Image (cartoon, grey):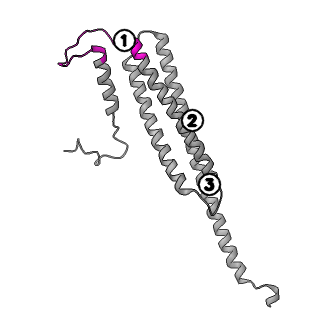
Amino acid sequence: GGAGRRGDMAEGSVRDRTREFMLTVQAVRDRQGATGNGAPRNVKKADPVQSRKRFSEKAAQIGKDIHKTADKLAKLTKLAKSKSLFDDPAAEIAELSYVITQDVQRLNEDLEDLGAIHRLENTPNSQSNEHATSVQKSLQSHLKQTAESFAGVLQTRSENLQHQQSRRSEYSSSNAFAGASQPSFMR
């Protein structure tokens, strides 16, 4: 049975949409006011105030999380710009890079969830829809800027590592030449 085995598929070709599905199920339940047996209690839509509140709370949390990730990125930037040959914070940089990568992936998923909430709980009020769309685009833009900054920091780190390697080679080769030539007083 290949349907249940993800390892057989190419990496990146499978996208886990469990969270989106659960949000969809919850939104349908909220709209229908489902009872324990699946029969709707009433047919009216979910309370628009509750829908906006749910969207706003999720958007606020995403905004806070983007800010926290940007703070981590600022720390990583400082570490990555370090040019010391002997006191390189490689382990701390690697750990922080991993954490930021995980944060960005989770935030992308959260933004997808926010979009699903917006689509599922769409109210007929066009001003409310425009606002929700604007909030979502703003958060996406902030996350994109953070991810691009992260890529820039990683590039800076790579360049610094190459420069350090070059300096190490320079020092080791100049030491070899220094030992080969004798001082003038020894001739």
For marks 3 and 2, the one nearer the N-term is: 2
| Pick the front one: 64 or 143 | 64
| Pick the front one: 54 or 131 | 54
Q: Secondary structure at mark 1?
A: loop
The residue range painted magenta reads 30-52
Residue, x 32% and y 24% (percent of image)? Answer: 24
For marks 2 and 1, the one nearer the N-term is: 1
> Measured along the vertical axis of the image, is residue 32 above or below residue 157?
above
Residue at the disc numbered 1 = 47
Instruction: Report how far apart the C-alphas of labels 2 and 1 lie in the structure.
Output: 35 Å
Residue at the disc numbered 3 = 159
> Residue type at mark 2?
Gln
Give yes or no for contact between labels 3 and 2 (Cβ–Cβ under 8 Å). no
Q: Left of 72 or right of it: where is 109?
A: left
Inspect the magenta stretch and tell me whether residue 73 lies in it. Answer: no
> Measured along the vertical axis of the image, is residue 187 above or below residue 86?
below
Q: Left of 114 or right of it: where is 35?
A: left
Q: Where on the picture, by quarter, is residue 83?
A: bottom right
Badge 3: residue crowd in 10 Å (few <14, some 14–19, many ≥20) = some
Query: Where residue 52 sits in the image (x, y, percent)?
Result: 43, 16
Q: Which mark is residue 145?
A: 2
Q: Where on the picture, by quarter, is residue 51?
A: top left
Residue, x 58% and y 49% (percent of image)? Answer: 155
Query: Where residue 87 sits in the image (x, y, percent)?
Result: 61, 61
